[in-house]
Image (cartoon, coloured by chain):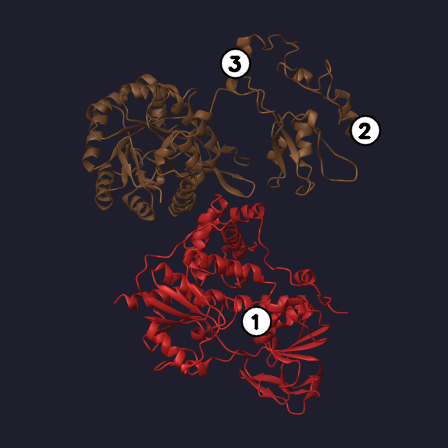
Chain colours: A red, B brown
Amino acid sequence: MAEFSTPTTEQEFAENFAQLKPVMNRTEALYESSRCLFCFDAPCIKACPSGIDIPQFIRQINSGNETGAARTIYEANYFGNACGKVCPTEVLCEGACVYNLQEVKPIEIGRLQSYATTKVIKSDKKLFGPGMENGKKVAVIGAGPAGISAACELRLLGYSVDVFEAKAQPSGLTVYGVAPYKITNEETLAEMAYLQAQFGYNTHFNSAITSRAELAELENKYDAIFLGIGLGKTNELRLPGEDKINCTGAVEFIAELRQHQHEVAVGRTVIVLGGGNTAMDAASESSRLGAETVILAYRRAKEEMGAYNFEYDLAKGVGVKGLFNVAPLEITGNGYVAGVKFIRTETKDGKVHEIAGSEFVQPCDMVIKATGQAKQTEFLSLIPYLKLDGKGRIIANPHTGQTSNPKYFASGDAWNGGAEVVNAAAEAKLTARGIHAYLSK
Amino acid sequence: MPDLSINFAGIKSPNPFWLASAPPTNSGYQVMKAFDAGWGGAVWKTLGVPVVNVSSRYGGVNYRDKRLVGFNNIELISDRPLSDNLREIEEVKKRFPNHAVIASLMVQSQQEWHDIVRQSQDAGADGFELNFGCPHGMCERGMGSAVGQEPKILQMIVEWVMEVAQKPVIVKLTPNISDITEPALAARRGGADAISLINTIQSIVGVDLDKFAPYPIVDGKGTNGGYCGPAVKPIALNMVKNCAQHPDIKLPISGIGGIENWRDAVEHILLGASSVQVCTAAMHFGFGIIREMTSGLEQYMVEKGFNTIDDMVGKALPNVLHWEDLNMKYKVTANINEAKCIGCQLCYTACEDGAHQAIKLNAGTRIPEIIEENCVGCNLCSLVCPVEQCITMEQTDSGTQHLTWKERVEAGTAPTEFEDEKAGGRHHWVPAPSAALSKERHKTLPGKARIINGETEVPAEA
């Protein structure tokens, strides 16, 4: 018997994917905010990549000034609501809370943050507006956390902004890649609509920029171009049988799940390949979709997984089984996935060694590869003089986000190689300031 | 954006938030940090006669898990050399010419008052606050609250000060007195430009159960201190209101007492304060709290459409009346929102034991029921209810009638005798005393209202 029964309706889907951090009611927000010690030089602020003044907004919530609290949050991070819900707060702000040292539950900062932002979004309270038009134009490629954050900040500085997005909706991985139990599509899109209404940037959906000619047009029309393109498809494993039906990439699987929810089918026995946070998400999601057995296969030891402990705990909590020190050799099956042929491994001096003769086949009817996303190097090669590092990441000035082609600026996963929403939001704010400094010269 | 700046009796300040005369304003270092953080003004820690302080000076009242809901101190006025204080006042004023620096003063003889006023004037102070409030130590030497409690002496000293003061003079009042308006009137007669209140309340915050000594303990002994912090706000608000409403005082008021967030400040302002002073909250959380205070005040002003602080000063005063002027025809009744009720039954037991036996329990449910005819609309259940908006007090009168006690007295319809039929509680049902001990008491309690002359509650004329 599976841990979850397969959801067949929106209602059942919502139950299986219940929010991990549901929005607080006022009573809970008051209790929780009153616990904050208002630390001097607060460690939570330091732990936040976007440097939100956390004790300040918590104090504002506690004194009934939720609007002021939301302003404090959005001044530092335009994805305030999304970050409250999807940030790995356990290792960021909440992990830094001094209560941890006292063995007291840390303040639920993420949920308090979403409490304040949800309030202003729901009441449609205007907190910001565009700055005085300065007559300059910036093109933003990608409507993810980096692109939208940059668009907001640039509008604040008076720029006219056009955002070009390949997909049909804004917010990037927040709506296409984050696990559904972290944030709902409605919550994500409500924040996007709220931001666009306040800042008034232009969005062009289903408008992928893919050719040199299109880039040249942007270069002519705009004073600067912001690259918030994120990462690409799941890396190919280059294994025999990878093209079998029901062998899919985690990013593609989750995007499908976010858009089609209960209509997405999952195998009875699912093997997820990988040991990062996306692997944990894909495994949890498979279980919540009704898979009877979900095996998380990682080629190193449990302790070496890149995923946060709480993410692995979450996966274990919904019945996911770990299978460690195994490397996939082949996806077996006749047209459809029927199993994965593994070889056992051991780690010596930090390197993975295969143990000869230890091959075995683990039967399954679905394989999800969570083995990292490829960089969009092909697209980036269309930009003249743009330099990438050895890992395919854009090289840019750490203080301004300016790339080796002075007209191009970057933030987010394409620059940092793949991090959290909060990192992209923080970097984009910095880069927007960098664009402003460059165009104000 | 609303304008937070004020002109308080001639003292200008970028916002109404001042640090009160206390440890946070002990030095130029602290005051500059505070101004840099966003405070609008500071009343310097009292300058005056030489003092020596004891070790162990503060005591706190914790309520459940909350620290320092009340705070007291037995610290005296500034123990730093006068010349150091004056030099630092001058330095602060040079760096922060638009912020308010007020010298708090406490000396004894006329000559001393003249000298210290002149000296602080020369140092550049924007005004003076005469400390007639300190309720411990200094009063034993005939200063502080000893002056505040003697209106004639208070007036005389104010007159001395006015002889030389060229800057506005604020008199800081002690609450350790039965009628705060008396010293306030004395301050006005003496020619003061403003008053500030309240200073701390004489207190003992606790007793050490092992050492048999009051906190804070100094070598096994203690003394009464001055009480402040969130706990004193209600007392301060009432006294601010008393001074603001008095027809003959007519002086600007700097509100002090229990202010730690923008809401507390707005309450002081709505009751007549045109600047506010903060100490305990800054001692507890540091100068950084000012950002929450200004942000909250600004947001409130935007939402209410107030452009300046003056727009809101005393806005609640017309609604603070004497008891005898309240409308006795107004009636509210408790209403429990069953969907929100969590079944704690705190309302039931509070009403049963602490009020008017107007809530009953029914078999098969934890949700209590209001006995409407017994409910006097006291609010107790809604106050103890832990759920937001679960018990609400709903108006049940027609809203068209108005009758006050004063009007009843004037019309001769007020009850005058012990057994008077016109008295209120006579017509309200109470359980028989013996029901308290009955095993079935919970069944007997939800009774019917006592019926007199066919009515179920207070008589028609009441």
Q: Relative to residue A220, is residue B266 depicted above or below?
A: above
Do circles 2 and 1 both sit on a common chain?
no
Q: Earlier in the sequence, mark 2 or mark 3?
A: 3
Q: How many marks?
A: 3
Instruction: Tell me the subunit letter for badge 2.
Output: B
Residue A39 drawn above or below residue B76: below
Chain to which mark 3 belongs: B
Q: Position of residue A338 (x, y in %)?
A: 71, 84
Give how far apart the Cα atoms at labels 2 and 1 are: 62 Å
Q: Residue at x 79, y 29 (%)?
A: B443
Residue appearing at x 61%, y 32% in the figure: B393
Quickly name the residue at label 3: B406
Q: Determine whether B111 is above or below A345 in the image.
A: above
Q: Residues within 10 Å of mark 2 (few under 14, many from 20)?
A: few
Residue behind mark 1: A277
Where disc 1 sits, the SS reads: helix
* Image point (55%, 36%), residue name: B210
Distance from the alpha carbon under mark 1 to that under mark 3: 73 Å
At numbered mark 2, what does the secondary structure look like: helix, strand or loop?
loop
Q: Nearer the viewer, mark 2 or mark 3?
A: 3
Q: Which residue is mark 2?
A: B440
User: A260 or B122, which lies in front?
Assistant: A260
Q: Residues within 10 Å of mark 3 (few under 14, many from 20)?
A: some
A301 on left or right of B301:
right
